[in-house]
Structures are given as C-alpha cells and as structure tokens.
Image: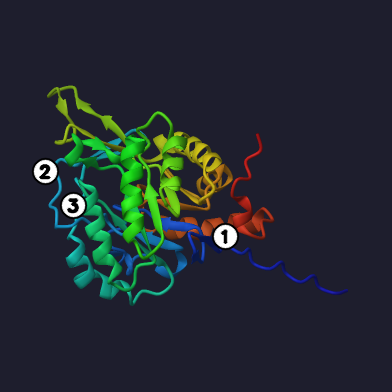
Amino acid sequence: MTATAPAPAPDLSVTFAGIKLKNPVIAASGTFGYGIEFEDVVHLNKLGGFVVKGLSREPMIGNPPPRLWETAAGMLNAIGLQNVGVANFVEGKLPKIRKLKGAKCIANVFGYSVGDCVAVIEHLNEAEGVAMYELNASCPNTKHGGMVFGTNAAELSDLVRQCRNVAQRPLMVKLSPNVTSIAEMAKAAEDSGADAVSLVNTFVSLAIDINTRRPRIANVTGGLSGPAIKPIAVRMVWEAAKAVSIPVVGLGGILCAEDAVEFLLAGATAIQVGTASYADPRAVENIAVGLKKWCDNNGVAKVSSLTGGLVV
C-alpha cells in the first residue's frame, strides 16, 4: 500500500503596494516600539512585518500621565505620540533594524501640518531599511483650526497628494474611524495617490472615575482599542475594501488567528495586531503561527485566497 504524500504547507505570503511579506501578520504602530525592543521576546522572522512608533519631525515627550486605562474589553490610551523624532530614529534605531531578518520594517509618519509629514518622509527617503511608509491621518492639522486630517476628505486628499509626491517608497494611509463614511475617506486616499490604506485607528472615547468625577485619562479623552472595537473595525474594512481597488490592511481588536481571518474575509490583504501585544508580547508571533495552522486545518492553500471571501 502506497503512503499518501503529506499536503504541502499553505502559502502565507501576500503582496501589497509592491511589497512581499512572508505572511499577512504585521505588528501595529505604537504597540511594538521600534521592533528591536522585541527581538529577544519575539521571533521576528515569523512576522510579515512591523510598524514602528509614529515618527515626527522633532522628538516628542507625549502627554502627561495617566495615559492608559483598561476598559472592560480593551483599553483607552492617550500617549500623545511620544517618539524619538525622525533624525534620532534614522541614526540610532534604523542601523539595528537593518540587521533584523525576515519581517519588513514600515515607518509610521505623522505631523501637525502637511509640511511636517513631508519633512519626515523626505528624511526617511535617504535612509535604508524601510520598506514603506504608513501615514497617520488621525492628527489635527494645527494650521487649519485643528481639523483632523482623516475626518475631512479635502484635508486628507491634500495631505496624501503632497506626501505621495515626495515619497520614494510605497505610501499606506492609516485612516481614522471617527468619520461618517470610511468608504469616502478610503476613496479620497486612493484618488490622491495612496498605494494602500490601513484601518481602523482608535475611536475617541472617555472614561470617568465616578468617585473623583474626573477623567481616567489626563488628556480627558483617549483612543479606544482592543476586542471591543473589532466588529466595528471589520465592518469598516468591508466597506473600505468595496470602495477602493488598492489593498486594505485591517486592524482593530485582533487577538487570535480566527480574528485575523475575519478581517481577510472582509477584504483585507494583511492585518495588524496592536493592543494584544500589551497583554502578551508574543501575540503577533502566536497569531502568525496560528494562522498557518488554521489554513492547514481548513484546506486553505493560499492565505491570499481568503481576501474578500465574505459571502453575503
């Protein structure tokens, strides 16, 4: 009797915006430091990629504490985009990142004016070791009354267009969920030159200490993330994916491989894992390993075949 040959391992590789990842699992910005902090904890070569903490034109110390508050199904944060600044990143962090094997490095970029964002990208253009940029569109434009770029289609379009004009690498735009139509914002980003969009960022929220009658967060409001937002995030990814032809990267409350599959079926090409890393520093790796097992157990030969597979 001839033994049956084992089925080939599932192909987890995905390509978006011209960048090939070994799998669709990416560590989200703000939850994975600059990547190098996790190299002794996580097998980085098992990840598709990681997004570094948001980079600004100058170093930022962030908001005063308290800056985090655990909620029933997630957390509020108002870190205030604390970071070392783009120059310090290029000089002090990137040389170490270049030595890492496997996972692609994505640089998250933000600023409080279009000029700030453009300046950060121009600085990064000259450095090696970054695969693509993720433009955070959830910051207030201080030169135009504080309107958040990602909540106004015209502001978003101008930001994306000017950044795309200078970016020498693929440009992914991270969209704010605090909008009436995520599909409209995704389309505005695409029409202005975005190579991909990622969504969703955190939801503006408020928690109150009923004994002191004061906010739990010093900044008063914070961004809600974690499992509480997952069904909303999945819905928004589905709506955005139907509206654009560029790749969509989904995030928001992913804790396990099955959560990742939901986002892929909704239309995501890849996913990002954020808040889960606070509870388990190895969450991103575990999800990548779990996704391979899920595909194997469910007869999925190519993980890319899951994208947009929702049946309605």
- Tell me, yes or no, if residue 43 can be seen here: no
Does residue 156 sit above or below 5 in this rendering? Answer: above
Q: Which element carries disc 1, helix, strand or loop?
A: helix
Looking at the rendered structure, which numbered label has been put on residue 292? Answer: 1
Crowding around mark 1 (Cα neighbors within 10 Å: few <14, some 14 to 19, many 20+) is: many
Q: According to the image, label 3 marks what residue?
A: 82
Residue pictured at 27% horizontal, 66% vertical: 124
Instruction: Decide which of 72, 174 is in the foreground and name it.
Output: 174
- In the rendered image, residue 288, in percent from the top left (x then y), is placed at 49, 59
Instruction: Decide which of 109, 266 is in the foreground and name it.
Output: 109
Q: Earlier in the sequence, mark 1 or mark 2?
A: 2
- In the rendered image, residue 306, in percent from the top left (x then y), is placed at 61, 51
- In the rendered image, residue 7, in percent from the top left (x then y), is placed at 71, 66
Q: Which element carries disc 3, helix, strand or loop?
A: loop
| Whole-number angstrom distance, CA of label 3 to CA of label 2 | 11 Å
- Identity, as a three-letter code, of the amino acid under mark 2: Pro
Left or right of 90, for residue 49 = right
- Identity, as a three-letter code, of the amino acid under mark 3: Gln
Does residue 197 sit above or below 17 in this rendering? Answer: above
